[in-house]
Image (cartoon, rainbow, N blue to C red):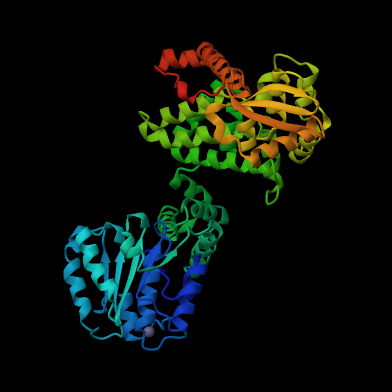
Amino acid sequence: MSLALARKWRPKKFSELVGQDHVVRALTNALEQGRVHHAWLFTGTRGVGKTTLARIIAKALNCNAPKKSDPCGVCDSCVSIDRGRFVDVIELDAASNTQVDNMRDLLDTAAYKPTVGDYKIFIIDEVHMLSRSAFNAMLKTLEEPPEHVKFILATTDPQKVPVTVLSRCLQFNLKPIPVPIIEDQMKKILGEENIEFDSQGIELLSRYARGSLRDGLSLLDQSIAQGNGKVEEESVKSMLGVVDESLVQSLVEITLNQDADLLTQKINDIERMGASFAFVLDEMASLLQRLSLFSLTTQGLDERLIEGYQRLFDQTDDEHLQLLYQIVTIGKRDLLLAPDEKVGFTMTLLRMMAFLPDRGRDRKPQKNKEIANSIPTSKSPATQKVRTKVDTHAQVMIDLKTNADWKVFVSKKVPSGMAKMLAENSEFESFVEGVLRLSLDGDQKHLLVDRYKDKLRDLLREHIDAKCRLKIKVGAVSDTPLATEESEIKQRLDQTTRDLEEDPFVRSLKDDLGGKLVSESIRPNK
Ligand SMILES: [Zn+2]
């Protein structure tokens, strides 16, 4: 194959463009109805079809025999525009400086009528890179555009385009192309090219393309070359430095089991395989995301996955998954700062190990009734959810006599939101004859809004007294739920830090590897 796939299969008509249906529909409608704006701006990340679309429009406007809105693709105009040899279509890449220098001269030619075509079309890619003077030159033409001039601008960074220019353009946002669409397109191309492939290899490449068909096709080129003319999962994996889902699952499991020996072994395995640690982190993040979703729905998952997910999910919980996700994504971000990828990767996984889900911690030391009850007995996440719901409704009407009772009420019964902030900043005064009196911290008096107060009153009526009334005055406070919570968090944080410092594993990290505990990264165990 002499021609790269991305170039060979570059769409030449609207009907061939995939993944941008909304934009294509708007453009073809406008062209069919002859409502042709004088300046378009296409935004979107790399490789989603911005300049491809620009060229199709340029052809549609200058084609000698257009079919509805689509260019014919075979007339002299279409052919020479495709080859980049049509004098009236001027294509510029603002990212290359030499061309920007010519920008003014080129724009000066806008005043002259097109030589061969119906329209003189300026296609400017990465337009945000233009210099101020070039923008000014363009603006002059944009303000009073001659009938025969069209601008088609493209950028990955629309925020850097001056508002004066933006406001004169019809803007279209091109979206990253979804994985299944990239997959379909790759399969179609390979079919036409008579190249053997397996679906797993294609799926992997499509995911790795990250929404860019162009990147996807160039990966496809590489994998055809590496796989001796075939696209197969194994060769794709080794090319991308990808690892198995099972390895990713076992990494998460190892951190949950805090098995440092096994972890070291796995990390060495990954290194030996020549896999990319950055990619493994990406895969872990996406597994954690799927696990979080798994707690809500099992739709679209095959049996094989469900079993593995269930096993992992049983050892964690929603909140903990969120934390792990954060650790992994931050770890990925900071990988560049690490001495090398392996060190960064190891530290990220150790950090994951340092945090266990609440029930995981509680389960070992004490087994009193309350804790035993809080451990879901059912294996299914769906029933687990129902259980939680039942639990919150099990208790009715709490006694509210003291400031301590008030704090319990606020922490247990008031869901987060503005009403909770109002409650947390208020101290209990008295509760007499169905009237609850609170005093609100003067610094927080902006929270005294009827809506929040009503919400709080409704909660009181639900849990304390069906006829409860609420009076809040602004005044001095000394012991609000918030103050208590803050000091508790501080205490727990101190304790967690001490635990971590004393942890033999963390200690060996510090002593052997010169590791340091990043205090900002420590979150208290609840
Ligand atoms: Zn044509």
In which quarter of the view is residue 490 placed? top right
Query: Which quadrant of the figure contains the N terminus?
Result: bottom left
Q: Quadrant of ligand 1?
A: bottom left
Q: Is residue 95 left or right of residue 437?
A: left
How many numbered marks, from 0 up?
0
Residue 30 vertical position relative to residue 8 in the rendered view, above or below: below
Which quadrant does the C terminus fall into? top right
| Residue at 42%, 19% in the rendered image | 515
- Nearest the viewer among 423 and 157 is 423
The percent coordinates of residue 517 (x first, y second) are 45, 19
The percent coordinates of residue 233 (x first, y second) are 53, 50
Q: Quadrant of residue 222?
A: bottom left
Q: Say whether residue 424 is left or right of residue 48.
A: right
Residue 133 image offset from top left, x and y in percent? 19, 61
Residue for point 28% across, 77% down: 145
Q: Is residue 11 above or below residue 392?
A: below
User: Can residue 15 be seen in this snapshot?
Assistant: yes
**Image quarter for residue 184?**
bottom right
Q: Residue furthest bottom?
A: 65
Kindly tell me whether residue 392 is visible in this rendering: no
Relative to 318, say whether 59 is above or below. below
User: Residue 198's x, y, as percent?
Assistant: 55, 56
Frontmost residue, 187 versus 332: 332
